[in-house]
Image (cartoon, rainbow, N blue to C red):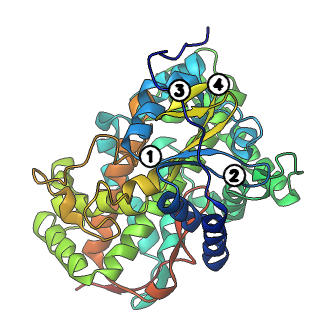
Amino acid sequence: MKRVEDPTHTSPRPLPEAEPRKGLRVLAGLARTRNPLTALALMREYVGQAFEIPAPRFRPAVFIGPDANRQILITDRERLSWRNESDPVVKLLRRGVLIVDGEEHDRYRQIMDPTLQRRNVNPHIPDFWRYTDQVADAWADDSTQDMLVEMRKLALLILMGASFHVDFAPHLARLWQPILHLIEYISPGLWIVWPDAPTPARHRNAIAAMDEYLYAIIRQRRAELDASGAAPDPSDLLGALIAAPGMTDDLIRDQLLTMLIAGHDTSTALLAWVFYLLGTHPATLAQVQQEVDAVIGAADAPPTADQLNELHLLDQVIKETLRLYPPIHIGNRRAVEDMTICGYHVPEGKRVMYSIYLSHRDKEYWNEPDSFCPARFERGKEEKVPAFTYVPFGGGPRTCIGATFAQVEARAVLARLLQRFDFTLLNSDKIHPHMGATLEPRPGVLMRVRRRQ
């Protein structure tokens, strides 16, 4: 049954577009930077907090700010669907928890949520520490490392090892390129204006390679659980999916691939951006290192959860990084019926986007929004902004399922690396945000790493 709008409300307005002269400026900015973020920022400046993108065959409604975020994420969430059948992410993840709605989503989330709650994540801190050493031990002293690449290696090892209880190291080299191809497949591209475009061979081959691997580990874990008769470990996501009634191998594959792609790619981007920001703010880098030294010291033993929670400045840096460069930089929905968002008419079937990146940098709500200022998240002195202005993990019932995992992981990984190494950024003038599946620092974050004495 369709919901009827309150007749006492003012009639909804049509979504505005940029007038021709300003539209040309938007196109000029896009041509100059080749970055869609530039076009979105100029549309926000010229048109306002709600607008329609007038691209050929791609005319989404875009909203910015806390009121729209709250309505999309909370109050009217049931009138919006996550699933756009023509999007590559749906073709890739099939029935993954990220792109299904209603009871189906709730069921998968009920199975997966417990393994990712803090009580089951904190015991993995020694694993986060160990995997960090596994990657960093390969760094020669006084060498140059691309932190975008290195953090991807680490994020993959951690996600597979801690969440799936699978040693991914023997498969990392073989599946590295297929994983990059899958990320490319679901990133903005030709499909936006040509949804029926044939899938390139490299993407088909990548899907086949990942499917072969994922179905193999599902069969192996299912056999192990059947043989032992024991319940899976509380932190074993793969085991929980296998133990749940009615979860076929196909459905389990969909959840694993969803977590593999979404989980590791967001952590990769976050960690790489932290290194970029610390590299461009060496005084803050020194202060964070001093905090790590004071709280954890030089011991090789992993820290406790309480020690990680004492790294207040590091936590502020992580939160400020998520504000400036949120890995999930834009939310994507589809209106399942005619509706009104912030006073604007949105017809049934319309693609609806809310820009997390621009909400996090909106000068109406943030002081010096483009500046790196970790102090704005100092405990007890947080910068006052309306609820739903800061939404790096979304909000409401569909808040990012891996939010706790990602935050504990980030603190543990960064603490260990800052404890072991000094870092110097080498290419700060060339790094720019790239709108892929996540918001990445391209062409990479090149850092000289020196072992600390």
Category of crowding for the residue at label 2, using alpha-carbon neighbours closer than 10 angstroms: few (below 14), some (14–19), many (at least 20)? many
| Cα distance between the residues tagged 3 and 2 | 37 Å
- Marks 2 and 1 sit apart, C-alpha to C-alpha, by 25 Å
Q: Pick whichever of labels 1 and 3 is earlier in the sequence.
A: 3
Q: Which residue is drawn at 56% across and 16% down?
A: 103
Which residue does the image show at 52% across and 53% down from the upper left?
A: 264
Q: Which of marks 4 and 1 is in front?
A: 4
Outermost residue toward the top in this view: 1
Residue corresponding to mark 1: 162
Q: Nearer the viewer, residue 16 or 369?
A: 16
Using the image as rendered, state which of residue 312 and residue 329 is in the foreground: 329
Above or below for 400 versus 232 = below
The residue tagged 4 is: 336
Q: Can residue 52 be seen in this view?
A: yes
Q: Which of marks 3 and 2 is nearer the N terminus?
A: 3
Q: How far, Cα to Cα, is label 3 from label 4?
A: 20 Å
Q: In which quarter of the image is residue 29?
A: bottom right
Label 1 crowding class (10 Å Cα cut-off): few <14, some 14-19, many 20+?
many
Q: Percent x, y for residue 178? A: 72, 59
2 or 4: tag closer to the N-terminus: 2
In this figure, which residue is indicated by the disc labeled 3? Answer: 11
The amino acid type found where label 1 is placed reads Ala
Q: Earlier in the sequence, mark 2 or mark 1?
A: 1
- The percent position of residue 90, horizontal first and vertical second, equals 71, 38
Left or right placement of residue 142 versus residue 245 in this view: left
x%, y% of residue 319? 30, 57
Q: Which of 64 and 173 is in front in this view?
A: 64
Which of discs 2 and 4 lies nearer the camera? The answer is: 4
